[in-house]
Image (cartoon, grey):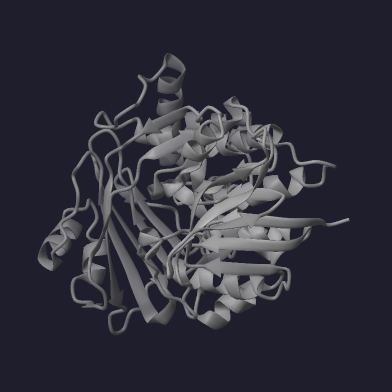
Amino acid sequence: MKKDKAVIIGGSIAGLLTARVLAENFESVTIIESDKLPLEAAKRKGVPQSVQPHVLFTKGYRILEELFPDIGNDLTAAGALSIDWVREFHVYIQGKWNFNSSQHSDIISFTCSRPLLEWVIRKRLQEFSQVEFLEQHRVIGLLADKNNKQVTGLRLKPLVKNGYQKFTASLVVDAGGRRSNAPEWLKNLGFKAPPETVINPHLGYATKRYKKPSGFNDDWKVMLISQEPPDNKRLGYLASIEGDELIATLGGYGGDFPPLDHQGFIEFARSLPSDKFYETIKNAEPVSPIYAHRATSNRQRHYEQIDLPDGFVTLGDAVCALCPVYGQGMTVSALSAMVLKDCLKEDKLIPHQFQKKLAKSNNYHWMLATGSDSRFPTTAGRSNPSPISKILGWYNQRLMETINQDADLYSLFIEISHLLKSPLALYHPRVFLKVLSS
């Protein structure tokens, strides 16, 4: 039997997918959103990072298809581009471009802007009559029973009129992202705030969109010129998106931020170790200003380590916010929603058990991001590498050199990168011997 009411804080990717999961278990699901949601694919004030590039891993796309069957057709109709990550992703690392296979693979997802992806998901979610949006309201606290043991809803402030209001619900899910105030709300109910771990690589982005140059016919849809710790702090990411446009992002670690003027942007691109990025955009027509982004620290809130009231859980970036350079964010949010989906199969959702399972799900993605970022000496909060991590670093460097020479190994690497196989597959004896003999 379905429960009565659930409410979600935040209408971004994590919140939207959580609403889809809750729609199977609750008679009413409400998403509280401080923005006025656009009727088309457009950036919005509450998600300033939406103008930056976002990567939808194949695992994330397959979760979307599970929750919204045939959503790929909707994405295509909206202008998103299907991408075969084995054939159409070109990455420059260790002084050379990756192995480019001519064979088709099933490691498929889409490349598009984040506003377009959110808009398509939002449209599909509106097909569920039990799901509604309460826009232009800000959450200012949790409601609870007289013993503060059970959360019973939210305290809201409307942004278009004076006053406050209460919203009751039997389950509150915080998907409020990096700006989540849940630690303070819990303290107000007499609970401890979760401990935090922060590892800050001091990475800064600058992003600009261009019309594709006349005659553009390259065989890639996404290009990455990667940073290489500890010395090469700069990176470039270039992707085809809807509207016959390219989204171009430059980044620098350790405060080596790209300039925010056109000529400085171009010169920064010229400084990358391959000229392919620069040659693509130097004569392209800009169609946007340059957008800066600096909120790139890795931050983990350890809700699994504290007591929580019944009727309240939190997920997505509100729990585990990762440096966006690794492109994990949207897929990790999708995985978070699926952890919740599994926990809702039990007779009762126990918040502490959910947060423990979520922490376990997040752990690999956290280690990947922070392990890579910690190789830069300018990263704040990093730990010194252990002897084992030094050995693994040496092996991984040899592995990357071998991948560029071996089609099967490259395909395996892409499968692991897109969360379709365990990373332990890279340490299988067969792979290990191939790497050592290369």
Point 59% across, 47% down: residue:
419
Q: Residue furthest left?
A: 263
Residue 342 vs 304, above or below: the answer is below
Left or right for 406, reference 290: right
Query: Is any part of residue 419 visible from this angle?
Result: yes
Q: Residue at x 31, y 84 (%)?
A: 215
Based on the displayed image, in which of its 4 quarters is residue 292 positioned?
Answer: bottom left
Viewer-proximal residue among 380 and 8: 8
In which quadrant is the N terminus drawn? bottom right
Query: Total number of numbered labels?
Result: 0
Is residue 411 in view? no
Q: Nearer the viewer, residue 251 or 182?
A: 182
Residue at 28%, 80% in the rendered image: 213
Image position, residue 98 (x, y; %): 41, 52
Judged left or right of residue 309, residue 45 is left
Q: Is residue 381 above or below residue 76?
A: above
Indicate whether 57 appears above or below 362: below
Q: Quadrant of residue 286?
A: bottom left
Place of residue 274 in the rendered image (x, y in percent of width and height, measured from the top left): 24, 55
Q: Nearer the viewer, residue 344 or 246?
A: 344
User: Closest to the observer: 33 or 94?
Assistant: 33
Query: Is 361 left, or right, of 394 in this rendering?
Result: right
186 to the left or right of 146 = left
- Vertical relation: 48 (above or below) 146: below
Task: Give the residue furthest to the right.
Answer: 1
